[in-house]
Amino acid sequence: MAKIIDITRTLQDAPIYPGSSPAKIESVLSMSNGDRCNVSMITAGSHMGTHADASSHFLKDSMTSIDLMPLAHYYGPCRVLTVDESAMITQKMLKGKLDGCERLVIHGGGLSYLTKEAAEYIVNTGVITIVTDALSVAPPDNEVEIHSIILSAGIAVVENTILDNVDDGEYILSAFPVKIGGCDGAPVRAVLIQIPD
């Protein structure tokens, strides 16, 4: 039987990008107050918690919002690869490890980011999706350049996952973004599916 590994962070508990406001869940209707059902209001940024970036997130002239991103990027075979924690990920660290990889899941302890050279290398390997356990694929001081390299190549990005108990290897990724028309990103429920030999 296949094993499903949840790599999605709980929205309210997920690390928050500096400058962002925390997610809020507020009760609108409550059965404990005599209402006939429970209904909540969710207030959160489009890049809160485990989420997907649309091309329009960083590409000024892109018309590709999250509802227009290719769904095939978010489902299919993937490879989990551990890199040094708190490292700047270089081309050398990736070289020879991405052969046949379409969806790359980077396990870096939540603090490892791509260098420009690594982003350019990934673009040339045939990878169509990058998943990371960091808040972003890029370091805070180089967000625009690295996102632009990746998104310009049509690569999908999923950020802020949790990979603490995931071994390196081959899995099936399922990480479909919520369909929000015209938006630059959206929450996802990301899982890895491990198929037994």
Image: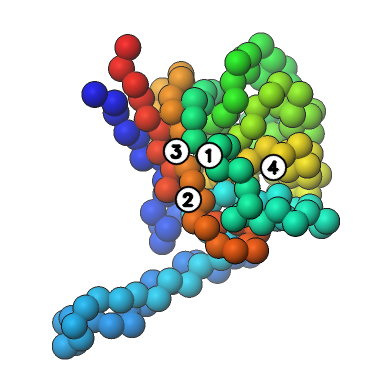
- Where residue 123 sits, quadrant-wise, is top right
| SS under mark 2 | loop
Amino acid type for the residue under numbered disc 3: Ser
Amino acid type for the residue under numbered disc 4: Ala
Could you give the CA–CA distance between mark 3 and mark 1, rounded to whole angstroms? 6 Å
| SS under mark 4 | loop
- Do residues under tags 3 and 1 come within 8 Å of each other at their CB atoms? yes
Q: Which mark is residue 188?
A: 2
The residue drawn where x is 42% and y is 58% is 11
Residue position marked by numbered label 4 in the rendering: 138
Q: Which of marks 2 and 3 is nearer the N terminus?
A: 3
Image location of residue 48, percent across then percent down: 53, 58
The residue drawn where x is 32% and y is 33% is 4
Amino acid type for the residue under numbered disc 1: Tyr
Q: Earlier in the sequence, mark 1 or mark 2?
A: 1
Q: Nearer the viewer, residue 67 or 80?
A: 67
Could you give the CA–CA distance between mark 2 and mark 3, rounded to whole angstroms? 9 Å
Q: Can residue 100 be seen in this view?
A: yes
- Do residues under tags 4 and 3 come within 8 Å of each other at their CB atoms? no
Q: Is residue 163 visible?
A: no
Residue position marked by numbered label 1 in the rendering: 74
